[in-house]
């Protein structure tokens, strides 16, 4: 066990820090759930890409810098420290990208990864359907082979950033007679094909955060099949592992929120505003939990670099970060007192910051990427070994 | 950067787990509750043969010359087994001897390594001294000075604990020449408290794991409504939640091992986080394990209470939760002692 960084890792941190200080936008960009904000975030991704920081752990040929996962953690730490914008292409770069790396053909890697790294093409995830939420194996949307095309019919829903994304990846039933986990295939589809209709859905803050996507005889070439036909479930499980586990929510995100919470607490006390008894400790505990998440991630990365694998443990992470995020934002709002409900534009809002927005987002954490109840089932059955029935 | 244990460390852990599973099953632990001293001298000797008390003793003095990152995994196993022998106090005492060096260390370290001496430590975390009745040498504080007192020179008064594995005493002694005074004594006592708290946290991980294991075993075999109770989601989700808590506590404890071994500037806060996280997890595991067992778990005959009471007493050992919560807040909120976010950066000034 050695918890110190190498000289190379320190040098990389310094380089990333200096670059981010010089290049990260000084004011927050508009939400990427608006058209203007979406484009502003893409511009930022282009800057990141030009600087060589878009996807540090990816191979150089795909637009990365060939760094290892430890350097990726270091980069994430610097990224959040700099307060740089959210990643508009997160479903692409953090979820689909690694899946293509694992299952894609050389042609698919060359075709999709570089444009993903630069966010020339932004991706959305099409898994959920009206009747297939937690029970994803209930997927009904079909993709029937017709010569060198799949013909897709049906509906996906809740596709985050579906309103403005260029491409969609999802699971489709390629064997119409199949049941449950069998006969599904992982297919990549551009969003502008004839027969495809995108209907944005406002999330609870009124922004078009996700979309329904309707398919009416949409023809997708067979080379857009990722992994073997009929084996889509296994391919999707790899993506889900990245989502719940390491990639989607790196620890620095929560350490950064925890540090802001500590500052908010200190400022509130200094201002002489009333603070509930016990608040001091609850804030400190959040900081401690964010710390646990970071330490745990370093453990996981060390294990992976040592040749190990992560499996169902990803479910432990998902519960931990999503509940921590909610706890921290609840405390943030409590510290703001009567101003907690004010929108940032309210004349008396002052320095309320984005605690409210963050809270509203945190509320979705226990739902997306597999609800926390589903994660508990997984932990109980696959880690603890309790009987399924 | 490598936040993982190596193969040798894992093998040593497995070896100790197997040894303890064979040598001190629950029936043996419970039998110890009933004896006068609650301790087993010959067994301590055997524990020394497998290297446990001498782990921190330098090789030159007959020990293994290892550090707390090696010790962490072994203490998880003593916790899992519910072992009552004074492994923690002796490890803390060994570190004091190592720091003090000189004749005292030369005399006592080989005896500890060979299993011929047990140590006890009094510290600011508690008015009571654990295992003062079997210790051959006791480290005791008096007016800011640190004393090393042989067993013959102490007066002890037993303070029976709800945890039959825990033997506590109020200790008096005739004050002689201290082994350290002033700042040095303070630094040694602080380090002893931190080391003991880390060790207790590592044991608490094993206690929590055992309590979860007991519950999973029971839930798999006990049937109600025609099915194993472990198939009910209410049961599954309780156990899943405490498993999450345990795994994140583990991360704190392993980091604290490293901070103690390297005398990191953040040692105090790192150790307090580990102690809080691990003892909370053990206490949560105890409550949930009891609930999963139903009435049978509430009996003296069943084993749940043995580990539950370990969880209670470890929570109070080397600083209770009020003490550690205070230090956590001092580090994170008041910033009067160092606390740095791992990887991320020091807290803002
Ligand atoms: C902000 C946000 C972004 C999203 N983005 C995407 C996206 O980009 N792409 C995409 O495909 N999907 C996306 N989703 C959808 C998400 O994956 C689903 O909401 C999720 O899988 C749950 O499905 P559901 O909403 O149909 O709820 P349901 O499955 O109907 O569940 C409702 C409730 O029942 C519980 N429940 C269901 N089954 C069980 C069970 N077996 N045991 C115990 N409890 C159970 C659930 O935990 C939940 O509390 C997003 C959702 C949100 C909120």
Image (cartoon, helix red, strand yellow):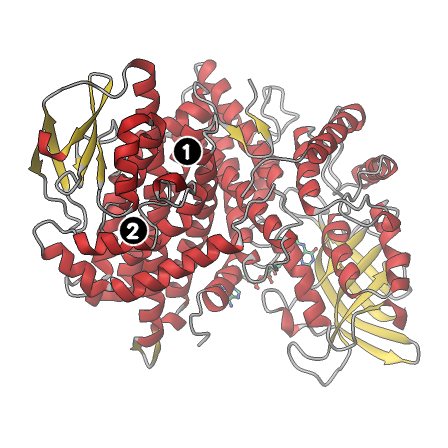
Locate the N terminus of chain B by quadrant. Answer: top right
Q: Residue sitting at 76 percent across and 62 percent down?
A: A102
Locate the C terminus of chain B by quadrant. Answer: top right
For residue A92, side relative to residue B141 (left or right) = right
CA distance for labels 1 and 2: 43 Å
Q: Quadrant of residue A191?
A: bottom right
For residue B104, side relative to residue A350 (left or right) = left
In the picture, the disc for residue A270 is none
Q: Quadrant of ligand 1?
A: bottom right
Q: Is disc 2 placed on a helix, strand or loop? A: helix
Residue denoted by label 2:
B48
Q: Is disc 1 placed on a helix, strand or loop? A: helix
Q: Position of residue A12 (x, y in %)?
A: 74, 33
Of labels 1 and 2, the one closer to you: 2
Q: Residue sitting at 14 percent across and 48 percent down?
A: B162
**A262 up-or-down from A118: above or below:** above
Q: Position of residue A14 (x, y in %)?
A: 73, 28
- Viewer-proximal residue among B76 and B137: B137
Mark 1 C-beta to ligand 1 under 8 Å: no
For residue A335, side relative to residue A52 (left or right) = left
Question: Crowdedness of circle 2 by 10 Å Cα count: few (<14), some, many (20+)?
Answer: some
Q: Are marks 1 and 2 in contact (CB under 8 Å)?
A: no
Q: Residue sitting at 63 percent across and 54 percent down?
A: A304
């Amino acid at each position: 066990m050695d918890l110190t960084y190498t000289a190379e890792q320190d040098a990389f941190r310094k380089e990333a820090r200096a670059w981010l200080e010089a290049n990260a936008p000084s004011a927050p960009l508009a939400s990427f759930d608006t058209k203007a904000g979406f484009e502003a975030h893409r511009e930022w991704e282009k800057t990141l890409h030009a600087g060589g920081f878009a996807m540090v752990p990816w191979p150089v040929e795909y637009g990365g810098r060939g760094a290892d996962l430890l350097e990726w953690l270091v980069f994430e730490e610097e990224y959040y420290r700099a307060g740089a914008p959210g990643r508009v292409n997160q479903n692409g770069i953090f979820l689909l990208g690694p899946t293509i790396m694992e299952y894609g053909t050389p042609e698919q890697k060359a075709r999709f990864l570089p444009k993903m790294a630069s966010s020339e093409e932004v991706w959305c995830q099409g898994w959920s359907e009206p009747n297939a939420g937690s029970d994803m194996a209930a997927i009904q949307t079909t993709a029937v082979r017709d010569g060198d095309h799949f013909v897709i019919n049906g509906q996906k829903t809740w596709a985050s950033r579906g309103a403005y994304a260029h491409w969609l990846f999802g699971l489709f039933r390629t064997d119409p007679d199949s049941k449950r986990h069998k006969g599904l295939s992982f297919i990549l589809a551009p969003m502008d094909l004839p027969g495809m209709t995108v209907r944005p859905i406002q999330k609870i803050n009124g922004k078009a955060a996700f979309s329904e996507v309707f398919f009416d005889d949409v023809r997708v070439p067979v080379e857009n099949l990722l992994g073997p036909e009929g084996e889509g479930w296994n391919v999707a499980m790899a993506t889900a592992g990245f989502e719940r586990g390491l990639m989607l929510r790196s620890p620095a995100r929560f350490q950064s929120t925890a540090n802001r919470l500590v500052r908010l607490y200190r400022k509130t006390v200094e201002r002489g505003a009333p603070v509930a008894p016990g608040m001091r400790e609850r804030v400190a505990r959040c900081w401690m939990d964010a710390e646990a998440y970071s330490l745990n991630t370093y453990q996981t990365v060390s294990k992976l670099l040592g040749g190990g694998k992560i499996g169902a443990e990803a479910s432990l992470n998902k519960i931990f970060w999503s509940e921590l995020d909610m706890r921290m934002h609840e405390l943030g709002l409590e510290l703001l007192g009567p101003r907690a409900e004010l929108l940032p534009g309210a004349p008396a809002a002052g320095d309320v910051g984005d605690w409210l927005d963050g809270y509203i987002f945190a509320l979705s954490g226990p739902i997306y990427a597999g609800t926390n109840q589903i994660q508990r089932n997984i932990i109980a059955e696959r880690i603890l070994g309790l009987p399924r029935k | 950067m490598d936040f993982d244990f190596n193969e040798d460390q894992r093998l040593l852990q497995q070896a100790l787990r197997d040894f303890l599973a064979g040598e001190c099953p629950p029936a043996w632990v419970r039998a110890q509750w009933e004896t006068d001293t609650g301790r087993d001298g010959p067994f301590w000797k055997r524990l020394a043969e497998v290297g446990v008390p001498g782990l921190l003793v330098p090789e030159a003095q007959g020990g293994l010359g290892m550090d707390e990152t090696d010790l962490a995994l072994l203490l998880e196993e003593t916790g899992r087994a519910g072992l009552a022998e004074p492994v923690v106090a002796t490890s803390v005492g060994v570190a004091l001897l190592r720091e003090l060096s000189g004749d005292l260390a030369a005399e006592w370290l080989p005896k500890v390594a060979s299993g011929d001496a047990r140590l006890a430590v009094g510290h600011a975390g508690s008015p009571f001294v654990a295992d003062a009745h079997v210790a051959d040498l006791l480290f005791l504080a008096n007016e800011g000075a640190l004393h090393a007192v042989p067993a013959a020179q102490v007066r002890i008064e037993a303070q029976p604990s709800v945890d039959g594995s825990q033997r506590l005493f109020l200790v008096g002694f005739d004050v002689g020449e201290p082994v350290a005074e002033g700042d040095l004594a303070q630094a040694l006592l602080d380090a002893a408290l931190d080391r003991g708290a880390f060790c207790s946290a590592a044991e608490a991980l094993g206690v929590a794991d055992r309590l979860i294991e007991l519950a999973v075993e029971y839930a798999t075999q006990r049937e109600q409504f025609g099915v194993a109770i472990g198939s009910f989601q209410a049961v599954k989700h309780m156990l899943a939640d405490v498993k999450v808590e345990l795994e994140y506590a583990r991360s704190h404890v392993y980091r604290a091992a490293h901070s103690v071994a390297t005398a990191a500037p953040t040692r105090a806060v790192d150790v307090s986080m580990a102690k809080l996280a691990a003892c909370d997890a053990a206490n949560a595991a105890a409550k949930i394990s009891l609930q999963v067992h139903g009435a049978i778990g509430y009996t003296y005959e069943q084993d749940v209470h043995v580990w539950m009471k370990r969880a209670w007493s470890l929570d109070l050992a080397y600083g209770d939760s009020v003490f550690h919560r205070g230090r956590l807040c001092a580090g994170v909120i008041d910033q009067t002692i160092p606390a740095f976010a791992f990887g991320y950066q020091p807290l803002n000034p």
